[in-house]
Amino acid sequence: NMAASAEGDAEGWCAAERPGAGGLALLGLAPSAPSCPHGPALLFVKTSQGKEEGRRFYACSACRDRRDCNFFQWEDEKVSEARLAAREEYNRNHQPSFTHRQNVERYENFVLLPLSKRRFCQECQQLLLPSEWEKHSDHQFLCDISTAQLKSPSQLLYPLENKKTNAQYLFADRSCQFLLDLIIDLGFRQVLCVGTPRLHEKIQSKASQEDDFRVRSLLLDIDFRYSQFYTEDEFCHYNMFNHYFFGGEASRETCRKFLYQDNGERVIMVTDPPFGGLVGALASSFKKLMSMWKKTEKEGHNNQEMPVFWIFPYFFESRILDYFPSFSMMDYQVDYDNHALYKYGKTGRRQSPVRIFTNLTPSMIVLPVEEGYRFCAICQRYVSSGNQHCEICNSCTSKDGRRWKHCVLCKKCVKPSWFHCNNCNCCALQNHTCEKTDAGCFVCGKAGHKRSTCPSLS
Ligand code: SAH
Ligand code: ZN
Ligand code: ZN
Ligand code: ZN
Ligand code: ZN
């Protein structure tokens, strides 16, 4: 059954990242796309050996797990009036129970309550007003919610870790502080936080506590729980895979206005999307945000791009550069609190594969010398302590922070654990199985190994 198997593929749609291999290709956001509760759906097609095969279909842009959203429609499918009406009703019913405005009003009432009456329902992830206690009486709740707790919602809310949809991995304070200091040192005054609630929270809470702190921020995120803590000028419910503002024109206008303040001169966008996400869909949304910024500029302003920090794993470097040739990858390793792999361990730190991609001049991104980063005068950028400048490549070539070695046959630097394999005609792990597959590795796209043995995951 074609529909069932294509639907099954829609579920694993990060396979669409791999051009050339059998999988799915993202065709993008069609003007006439149907909508699910997460906004316009994305158009996909099944591919085999790099060729489109079979019928094109629409699937939810935000959810890769069909349990979160099972929207599916063939591109050429005739949808009856009755089904369209049912779908519209379904979409309406699957919006949050309170509007953002209602949540703001609830917050205003909540802060008037004495500490002893301030409850937060952990099951519903909701601030409770006394009249609602009854309804939540058999739920777990927290009491005595302090002003400090209200100012750090990312600590109060549990992280939505479900990998396939939200993948909410929160910055370790070390990394969050580093980002903020860097932003301030670079002279930015407006930070558009796209999927970075913890950075937003740090900026908001400083702004409310320190009179001379001039940085402002706006959070765009799909996690609507945050609307309980921020006004319409501080948070927009937004889907970064289809550039959809759930709050409609008013919300889009908030974003536009934010980018316009200060004539857009000292604005930076900082984004940390789910890593499983489609790079192509993200890039297209970010381009739209960047052009929103561009339109705010005075005419005659030179051909600049809105400054961006895109936080993403290093093995997506070539994919990001495909869409943004002006970007470069910084060596700084971004750490997380709730990620088993990417945080400081008890026995010292694990290497995180997550980096900052930016269109700012690399030499301006000063990395902390206390953590071992140093400046390479030839490359004109800060690099990891283990990243040696290779005389032959004439660059600091390590991507993962370890010292890489030069292979004369491959004419490039490779990971320390790799050896040149004459069979495969390239460097690979010593225990790799030589296999000539046209399809590249699922993770890094390179030939010679499968996902299970991908060196970038070791
Ligand atoms: N490190 C960041 C959080 C990154 S986790 C921090 O500490 O601030 C990814 C973030 O993107 C989460 O906040 C998640 O809610 C958000 N997100 C996931 N899918 C999204 C989508 N489709 N559109 C917008 N935001 C999304
Ligand atoms: Zn959906
Ligand atoms: Zn160098
Ligand atoms: Zn080299
Ligand atoms: Zn080699």
Image: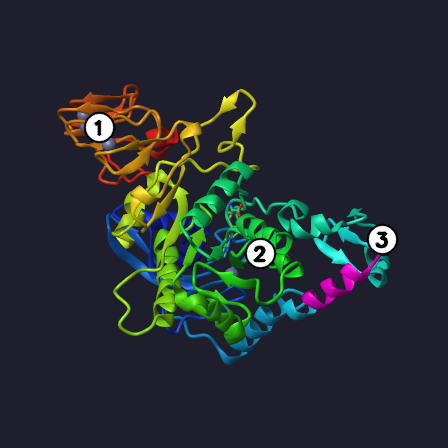
Q: Amino acid at mark 2?
A: Asp
- Local crowd size for mark 2, using a 10 Å CA cut-off: few (<14), some (14–19), many (≥20): some
Q: Amino acid at mark 1?
A: Cys
Relative to 422, say whether 83 is above or below: below
Q: Amino acid at mark 3?
A: Ser
SS at circle 2: loop
Outermost residue, front direction? 212
Indicate whether residue 19 is drawn in magenta: no
**Residue under label 3:** 137
Mark 1 and ligand 4: say if the CB distance to the nearest ligand atom is below 8 Å: yes
What are the residue bounds of the magenta stretch? Answer: 103-117
Outermost residue, bottom direction? 81
The reply to whether residue 195 is visible in this rendering is yes
Tell me residue 419's x, y (percent): 23, 20
Q: Are marks 1 and 3 in contact (CB under 8 Å)?
A: no
Whole-Å distance between the Cαs marked 1 and 3?
61 Å
**Residue under label 2:** 223
Whole-Å distance between the Cαs marked 2 and 3?
25 Å
Tell me residue 377's x, y (percent): 24, 34
In the rendered structure, which disc, 2 or 3, sits on the residue that comes first in sequence? 3
**Residue under label 1:** 413
Tell me residue 364's x, y (percent): 33, 44
- Local crowd size for mark 1, using a 10 Å CA cut-off: few (<14), some (14–19), many (≥20): many
SS at circle 3: loop
The reply to whether residue 22 is visible in this rendering is no
Tell me residue 440's x, y (percent): 27, 39
SS at circle 1: strand
Residue under the point 52% across and 46% down: 167
Mark 2 and ligand 1: say if the CB distance to the nearest ligand atom is below 8 Å: yes
